[in-house]
Amino acid sequence: MSLESTLNTSNAALREGVPAQQTYDYLVRGRMAGRGPAPKQNAVRRNKQPTEELTGKAVEAPPLFKRAKYSTATHRWWDTWADSPQAEAFLPTDWERLQMLAPMVEEYWQGDLKLLAEIRLNEERLGATVRDRQSLRMKLDKIKDEAEADALPEGVIDMDLYRELGGDS
């Protein structure tokens, strides 16, 4: 940097209210004001937690114990968990937690609203919401059905089918 451009930059900084020492440190010494040493160029995070990669593949969930005694709402709740992408990461202890939670969910649907806090807390531990999955470091690949994955977007013509039907001859 030439002396003239340094002075111009320094004068402009002073006009904007930047302290002279800070401007001098930045322009001449090549550093900015701050506390402590500058971070290393290739710093390595040592506290990085492993992530759970979820593919969204269907898993064989255990049946809901004594399913007949539960309402349709509780059946729907259980089936939602059984079909959820995070179910592929569940261990037998996680399924047991859901089995123990089912009676509370049933009572909640019968009108006992104070149980919602306990249900929410247990579901949080299993990754119920986006935020819960982020804190558990669950990473979900958005997998579509094979038919959807192979399907062309709307408005796009399948050229092989077009040729088979005699087009572009």
Image: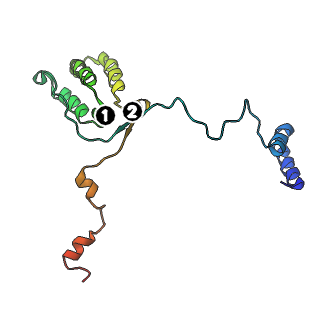
- Give left or right: position of 28 versus 85: right
Q: Position of residue 31 (x, y in %)?
A: 77, 40
Question: Which residue is at the front of the view, 127 or 55?
Answer: 55
User: Residue at image x 19%, y 28%?
Assistant: 73
Q: Position of residue 18 (x, y in %)?
A: 81, 40
Colour mapping: rainbow
Crowd class of label 2 (few under 14; some 14 to 19; many from 20; radius 10 Å): some
Which residue is most to the bottom?
169
User: Residue at image x 65%, y 41%?
Assistant: 41
User: Residue at image x 54%, y 30%?
Assistant: 46
Q: Is residue 131 above or below residue 16?
A: above
Q: Position of residue 20 (x, y in %)?
A: 86, 39
Q: Secondary structure at mark 1?
A: helix
Q: Which mark is residue 86?
A: 1
Q: Is residue 28 above or below residue 38?
A: below
Quadrant containing the C terminus is bottom left
Q: Is residue 17 visible?
A: no
